[in-house]
Amino acid sequence: MAAEQLAGARPPVHDPLCFHCQQTAEKYLKALLKEHGVSIPKTHDLDVLLNLLLPHQPKMASLRRVLNILTQYAVEYRYPGLHASSRQAQAALQHAGRVREQVRRALALRLGKR
């Protein structure tokens, strides 16, 4: 994941790291929607994508909280004003990893290295 490479950057680059974590989750959810033949909307709102997935993947409901956290990094942190903290960046990495793991499991893909 690009976010993992950013995690080791010096000086820290928390804002782009969080953005890439959101993008990771978004792309994984959209891949799963595609697998189920669901039309994919043009949105960065991960809750919208989750709601489309739930009829096909009810276990994904457990991701709602982390998806809502990640959604905020799609736009707001890419422009001047808000800045993600080190703590937020670490949490975003964990959340993106959790989404990746669950979606890969649903797609019957190996979890292996990122």
Image (cartoon, helix red, strand yellow):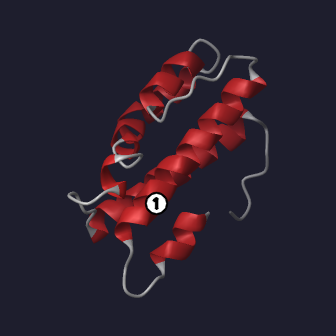
Please state if 111 lies on the left or on the right of 41 as rendered: right
Image check: 110 left or right of 29? right
Residue 94 in sight: no
**Residue at 59% in and 11% down:** 55
Q: Nearer the viewer, residue 68 or 43?
A: 43
Tell me if residue 23 can be seen: yes
Q: Which residue is mark 1?
A: 93
Q: Eyeballing the image, is 77 above or below 90? A: above
Q: Position of residue 91 (x, y in %)?
A: 36, 58
In front of the other: 5 or 55: 5
Q: Position of residue 101 (x, y in %)?
A: 62, 47
Neighbor class of circle 1 (other Cα within 10 Å; few <14, some 14-19, many 20+) is many
Q: Secondary structure at mark 1?
A: helix
Q: Residue furthest front?
A: 80
What is the quadrant of the N terminus in the image?
Answer: bottom right
User: Quadrant of residue 30 in the image?
Assistant: top right
**Can you say which quadrant of the picture contains the C terminus?**
bottom right
Quarter residue 10 falls in: bottom left
Q: Position of residue 51 (x, y in %)?
A: 49, 18
Q: Residue furthest top?
A: 55
Going by the numbered disc 1, the residue's amino acid type is: Leu
**Residue at left offset 41%, top offset 58%:** 18
Residue at 52% from the left image edge and 65% from the top image edge: 3
Residue at position x 25%, y 67% from top?
85
The front one of 46 and 109 is 46
Query: Is 60 or 73 nearer to us in this picture?
Result: 73
Q: Position of residue 58 (x, y in %)?
A: 56, 19
